[in-house]
Image (cartoon, grey):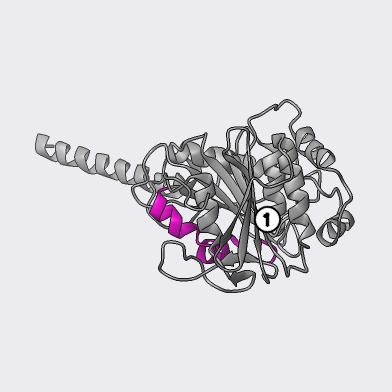
Amino acid sequence: MRISTVRDATRRLASFVALCLLAALAVTAGDVPGAFAADGTLRQITGFGSNPGNLQMYEYAPAGLPAGAPLVVALHGCTQSADDYYADSGWAKYADLWRFAVVLPQTTTANNLMSCFSWFDPAKDARGVGEAASVAQMTGYALRQYGGDPHRVYVTGLSAGGGMAADLLADYPDVFAGGAIDSGLPAQCAASLTAAYGCQSGDQGLTPAQWGDKVRRSDPGHAGPWPRVAIWQGTADYTVRPVNATELRDQWTDVWGIGQTPSGTVSLPGGTTASVYADGSGRPAVEVYSVAGLGHGLAVHPGSAADACGAVGAYFLDAICSTYYTGLFWGLDGGAVPHR
C-alpha cells in the first residue's frame, strides 16, 4: 500500500473519530456545565443535579453574556409553565437590556395537580430537601455554566411561585441577595395544604417577631446579611388576600431589624404605591408595592418603553411593569434607582 493511501486512510479515520466526539457532545451538552454558550434562546437543561424535587430546569441568557453577570431565578404560578413566564413576565426583555441570565424552574402535574410549587410542604420547601433543593441546584449549575456573580443572585415568583420564592429566601439567604414575591405568601406560612388555604385567605395573627423567627429558623446558622425583598400585591386580589403583603412586610422588616413604619412612599404608574423600608444606612431593604384594583396575578404593562414589559394573559394583568421596578430595586440596571 502506498504511503499516500495510508495517510488518506488515517485522515479519514481521524475525521470520523472527531465527528463521533462532536455528536456525543451534542447529545450530552445539556448535562455538562459550560457546554452551552449563551445564545438568546430558552432551553431546557438536564443533569443539573440530583433533583430531589422532580423539577424541570429552563434557562435564558442573552447572546454574548459576559462573565460575572447577575442571575435571576423566576418561578411561575399555578397552572402556568416556565415558557409562560418566559414569554409574558418581561424578564427576557430586561435580561437582554441589562445583561443577566434567567433560570425558570418548572413543576408539573406529576408533583401537583395544578402545577403549583409546594410552598406549604416541609418535605419540599425547606433547605436541602425537595423542590427547594432542586432550585438551589439549578442556581449553582447556572452560576458555574455562565461564570455568574454569586453575590448577585435573585429569586422571584408569582402566587405559589411567590410562596416558594419567600421560602427560598429564608432557606438560602447565603445564596440569594434579593427577592420579589408577587401575590405570594410569607416564608414558611403553612406546613400543610389545609393550612395553606388559611394563609391565602386570612390574617394569621402573628407578630413581626414571630414571622421573623420563621425565617431565622429556616437556616439557623445564618446571622446575615439578609436578602432585600420586594413585595407586590393587588388590592383586589381575592385568591391571595392583601393581608399577606402586610405579613410579608412584618416578616422581612423584623429580619432586618427595622420598624414597620415606612421611611418613605412613592406614587408609581398603574395606581401603584411603593412603601420603602430602609436599613440603617438608608438603603431600601424592603419595599411593598400596592397596586390599586389589581386582582391575582403578575402586574405587567405591554409596550416598547423602557418601563413597559410583558404580555397580558391568564394571571398576567395590565397595570405596571413590576419586573422593571423589581430589577431597579435589585440594581440590575447598574445605575441609581429613579423612584427612591
Location of residue 340 in the rendering, given as x and y in whole percent from the top left corner: 53, 49
Q: Amino acid at mark 1?
A: Gly
Magenta residues span 77-99
The answer to whether residue 48 is seen in the rendering is no
Residue lying furthest bottom: 313
- Asked if residue 220 is among those painted magenta in the image, a careful observer would answer no
Q: How would you rate the neighbour count of disc 1 (Cα within 10 Å): few for under 14, some for 14-19, many for 20 or more?
A: many
Residue at 48% of width from left, 48% of height from top? 337
Q: Magenta includes 95?
A: yes
- Residue 58 % position (x, y): 54, 53
- Relative side of 261 to 71, left or right: right
- For the N terminus, the quadrant is top left
Q: Height in image: 334 above or below 225?
A: below
Q: What residue is disc 1 on?
A: 161
- The answer to which image quadrant residue 210 occupies is top right
> Residue 324: in sight, yes or no?
yes
